[in-house]
């Protein structure tokens, strides 16, 4: 069974926890791998905000979606850490406290709620 293998197990636990951390960083620093404009059918590399000073309503006509880019940024970082963790021998990782696997995502969710509060105050 693949899910019972120790390298896959290490990869899954580290990927899950580090994805949560990298997502908070991507959200806080606005690091989207790409920006999607769904109404226009356009995808641009990187984070792009509307800079139209003559007509700020252009952001309303062609709203940008950053979530996909933030998730992709977090996935790349988490994949890196997950692959490195899968390469470690099992005896090196037994000493780590496994509670962080649940604590880190819980704290990351709290951080995401905090970071998105300004959007609800508009």
Image (spheres, rainbow, N blue to C red):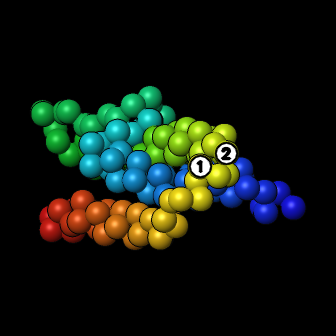
Residues 15 and 98: in front is 98
- Local crowd at mark 2 within 10 Å, few (<14), some, or many (≥20)? few
Query: Which residue occupies 16% across, 38% down?
Result: 55
Residue under circle 2? 89
Residues 28 and 122: in front is 28
Mark 1 residue element: helix
Tell me the number on the disc at residue 80: none
Mark 2 residue element: loop
**Quadrant in which the N terminus is drawn:** bottom right
Tell me the number on the disc at residue 92: 1
Q: Is residue 41 visible?
A: no
Residue 35 in the image, given as x and y percentages of width and height: 41, 38
Q: In the displayed structure, would residue 15 be above or below residue 76?
A: below
Residue 20 in the image, given as x and y percentages of width and height: 44, 57
Query: Which residue occupies 53% across, 42% down?
Result: 81
Q: Is residue 66 left or right of residue 96?
A: left
Query: Which residue occupies 34% across, 35% down?
Result: 47
Query: Which residue occupies 31% across, 69% down?
Result: 110
Using the rendered view, name the quadrant where residue 100 is placed.
bottom left
Q: Is residue 54 left or right of residue 96?
A: left
- Local crowd at mark 1 within 10 Å, few (<14), some, or many (≥20)? few
Residue 8 in the image, given as x and y percentages of width and height: 72, 53
- C-alpha gap between disc 1 and disc 2: 6 Å
Residue 82 in the image, given as x and y percentages of width and height: 59, 46
Using the rendered view, name the quadrant where residue 29 is placed.
top left
Q: Are marks 1 and 2 in contact (CB under 8 Å)?
A: yes
Q: In the displayed structure, would residue 23 be above or below residue 42?
A: below
């Amino acid at each position: 069974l693949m899910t019972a293998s120790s390298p896959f197990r290490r990869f899954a636990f580290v990927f899950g926890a580090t994805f949560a951390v990298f997502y908070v960083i991507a959200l806080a620093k606005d690091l989207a791998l790409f920006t999607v404009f769904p109404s226009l059918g356009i995808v641009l590399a990187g984070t792009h905000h509307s800079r139209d000073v003559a007509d700020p309503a252009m952001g309303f006509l062609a709203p940008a979606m950053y979530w996909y880019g933030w998730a992709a940024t977090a996935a790349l970082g988490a994949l890196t850490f997950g692959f490195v963790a899968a390469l470690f021998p099992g005896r090196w990782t037994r000493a780590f406290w496994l509670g962080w696997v649940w604590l880190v995502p819980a704290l990351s969710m709290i951080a995401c709620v905090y970071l998105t509060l300004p959007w609800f105050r508009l």
